Amino acid sequence: MENSDTYKTLAKPSNEVLFKEKKSKFLGYAFPITSEDDVKPIIEGLRKKHHTANHVCYAWQLGVSAISYRANDDGEPNNSAGMPIYGQIQSYKLTNVLVAVARIFGGTKLGVGGLISSYRKAALMALEESSIVEKTIKAYIEVTFGYPYMDKVMRIIKHNQLVIVSQQLEMDCNIIVSTVKSKAQPIALKLNALKGIVAKERAIKS
């Protein structure tokens, strides 16, 4: 990913697309996903929808700094379906995405080369139909300090345009702020360098 603070994904599932090759039908779909657990129900749904499909092949990618992915040929010859689909995900530089292609056999064998180009084309068409969005990766810093240090902390928050996510002002003050990922560590170091202030990065699901 070129910019470590952003990534590209889909705003919503694509419309169904259809690519035909020698009477075989290739129905392509693209879906935004947030975890591997999202994949199975979507693929099962497509199998039910296209119960005459011989294969439902797919590829997915998750994560930004730590990438995980899978490509599944679903009984087609090795690397003739899942990897061509995954290649389109890579060419669009997308993550947190699943692309699936259901194939309904038309009676004529396409050969490995024909399968590769057909699955690639159906995946490409599904992504062309998709609404692609750029999302910002947030990081969170938990800041703990006593009341006398409130002004210093608030000055740093304002200067660095940090967003206050939550605050507890009791015996000690505890504030959680968010910023873009690349700025979190330098800001935490700056806060920790000040007397009476403890700052640590926190993982919070957005």
Image (cartoon, grey):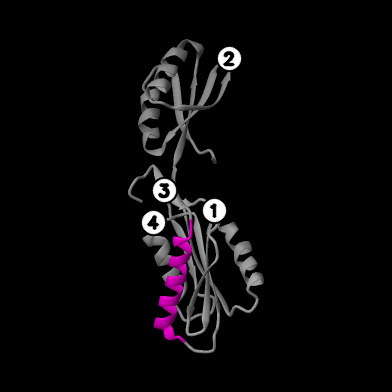
The location of residue 7, given as percent across then percent down, is: 41, 48
Which residue in the structure is indicated by mark 2?
A: 171
The answer for how far apart the CA atoms under marks 2 and 3 are is: 40 Å
The answer for how far apart the CA atoms under marks 2 and 1 are is: 45 Å
Q: What is the span of residues highlighted in magenta in the rendered image?
A: 110-130
The circle on residue 12 is: 1
Residue drawn at the location 53% of the way across and 38% of the way down:
204
Magenta-colored segment: predominant secondary structure: helix
The location of residue 164, given as percent across then percent down, is: 50, 26
Q: Is residue 34 visible?
A: yes
Secondary structure beneath label 2: loop
Type of amino acid under label 2:
Met
Front position among marks 4 and 1: 1
Residue drawn at the location 37% of the way across and 34% of the way down:
183
The location of residue 29, given as percent across then percent down, is: 53, 65
Residue drawn at the location 42% of the way across and 82% of the way down:
114
Q: Earlier in the sequence, mark 2 or mark 4?
A: 4
